[in-house]
Image (cartoon, rainbow, N blue to C red):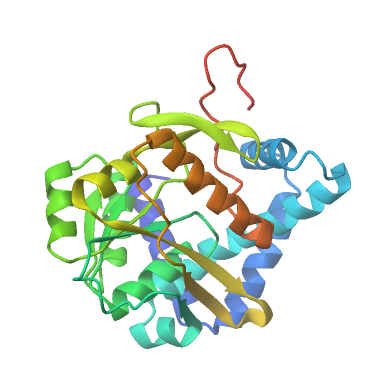
Amino acid sequence: MKKNTQTALISGLLRVLSALPYGWVARLGEGLGSLLYLIPGRRRHILHTNLRLCFPEQSERQRRRLARATFQHVIRSYLERGVQWYGSARAITDLTELDSAIDLQDRYDQPTIFLGFHFAAIEAACMYYSIRHPVASIYTPMSDQATDAISKARRSRFGTMMIPRHGSARDILGVLKSGTPIMLAADMDFGLRDSVFVPFFGVQACTLTAVSRLARLSGARVVPFVSEVLPGYRGYRLRIYPALPAFPSGDVRADAMAMNQFLEARIREAPDQYYWVHRRFKRRPPGEAPVY
């Protein structure tokens, strides 16, 4: 099947899913996730490897139970993208609760970087915020141009300014200083450039230093947020925390460690909702063997 045809079919399926009751789609995603977890594959291998590295204190049985629940959330999140990408603004806001420790109207008092993480509901949280407030988002372009175009169009449909990850630093700083907050995620291995190796669950992880550099250059506060899937198929919660204290510190390694420590604490609150299926430990420090 040609990629353009495949992309069109996926887009059509998401449109259909957006018209179905949320609870149905969520249950369908969980069921499909349970079935797909039974099939050995690359993503399941990555998932098991990550859990073994990060939760060595757990038994094999506990980690498999966590892996299955994670797979359910991951597949469910793909199906729920229907309402997130094609549903109405009201449908998204009705499904999302907001719990913010900061006043979201004071964005012009100080530039703001919203630091997100790859939990299952991150897409919903970002879409909800973009409905309520002006925002820009730094994103990683997809390799397939047709899929990337659809993704960019749907994510920006409520006015979000989409900025490619390797875009101009001057443009990013201009957006921050204009009073428009920027959302970005820094919990993936994006390569050795502008990164340092610091612990993540006790394992050295290639971690971006771009957040602290941007904060230093722009004078921005760094405000972490976490997206939660609520129990009982009630939707999502966007939880916005106070700005990270003394950030940036002037030490990019210390800042990277602070980000990872904050994320670790949030993951322990809902470990099955984190995207353990990505290769967080793809690159290793000199002398260390590959883990995948």
- Residue at 48 percent of width and 55 percent of height: 117
Q: Quadrant of residue 15?
A: bottom left
Where's residue 229, x and y in %? 59, 71
Q: Which residue is at the front of the view, 82 or 183?
A: 183
Q: Which residue is at the front of the view, 148 or 64?
A: 64
- Asked if residue 261 lies left or right of residue 4, the reply is right
- Asked if residue 50 lies left or right of residue 6, the reply is right
**Residue 14 appearing in the image:** no
Q: Quadrant of residue 24?
A: bottom right
- Residue at 20 percent of width and 45 percent of height: 217
- Residue at 19 percent of width and 42 percent of height: 167
Q: Quadrant of the N terminus?
A: top left
- Residue at 12 percent of width and 45 percent of height: 170
Relative to 144, is 288 above or below?
Answer: above
Where's residue 272, x and y in %? 68, 58
Q: Looking at the image, how many numbered discs can be counted on the residues? A: 0
Q: Quadrant of the C terminus?
A: top right
Where's residue 235, x and y in %? 55, 79
- Asked if residue 119 lies left or right of residue 55, the reply is left
